[in-house]
Image (spheres, rainbow, N blue to C red):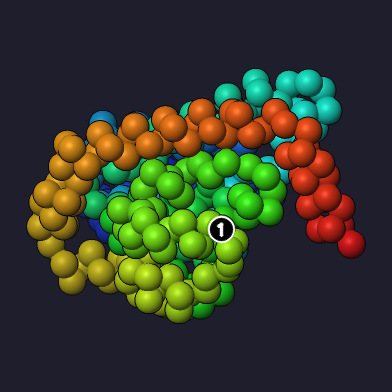
Amino acid sequence: MSELIDLQDCAGGRGMMIRMQAPRANALEPGMLSALEGAIGQVRARAPEFLFLTGGRNYTSGGDVARFLEAAAQGAVADYAGKVVPVLQRIIMSLLTLPCPVIAAARGAITGGGAGLLFAADAAIVAPDAFVQPYYARMGFAPDGGWTALLPELIGAGAAQGWLMADTREDAGGLLRLGLAQEIADDPQAAALARMEEFDPAALAEIKALVWDAPRVNAVKARLEAETEAFRRRIVTPKTHARMQRFLSDAGR
């Protein structure tokens, strides 16, 4: 489909697969997000039995801090954030409202707002090296990607808030214990395909529709909008810019 996103049929045409293949560990940049949103639109139009969402060595590293800092130096960080965060939030909603089950097959880093692409899946199979970390408190960002809009629905409000405030890293075993992953596999994509052979995708779609009914979906949508506004407030502050600079300096050591 593009150099950033690959969309293809799988399982003999019964399902479809979106593979993220963008630079910097599938960083959520405007071009990548636009391509991903377009791919999900094509999936909706094709109406497959199921969708696999996967990446390469890393599922996604979230927003590109260097790009945010560069935009801040140019006085354009609010405009840049407007090309990233609202699109990510729309993608989260699109995944939640796809009629078919969405299975994430993830390796490596799943960080920042990119974790929303795991939270919004209906099931997740992760490799042993997979991990999730928010980084928001460390960076001075407000959460996006459903960390406050969607995650509390999945693990409870107290657990979600505690995770964000502690900025801890959950490995594959931790994701399994939290219910954010259903299986750990050396080859997540093969395990996801086996799961779709074992279970009836139509039954999974019915389960999804019953869980994500209109009141629950509308509540998540409203909270995603609140996340976007909070992100816009935080990203323009000098303290956040200083924290981004410190983060990149530490990462370069």
Residue 179 drawn at (x, y percent): 33, 69
Quarter occupied by the C terminus: bottom right
Label 1: how many Cα within 10 Å (few below 14, some 14–19, many 20+): some
Q: Which residue is drawn at 78% across and 52% down?
A: 247
Q: Residue at x 28, y 71 (%)?
A: 194
> Residue 182, located in which quarter of the rendered image?
bottom left
Residue at numbered disc 1: 165
Q: From the viewer's perspective, is residue 166 above or below residue 39? A: below
Q: Residue at x 83, y 28 (%)?
A: 73
Depth check, front residue: 200 or 98: 98
Q: Which residue is drawn at 58% across and 24% down?
A: 82
Residue 161 drawn at (x, y percent): 46, 56
Q: Element at badge 1? A: helix
Q: From the viewer's perspective, is residue 146 above or below residue 166? A: above
Residue 150 drawn at (x, y percent): 36, 48
> Residue 68, located in which quarter of the rendered image?
top right
> Residue 80, located in which quarter of the rendered image?
top right
**Residue 64 seen anywhere in this rendered image of the structure:** yes
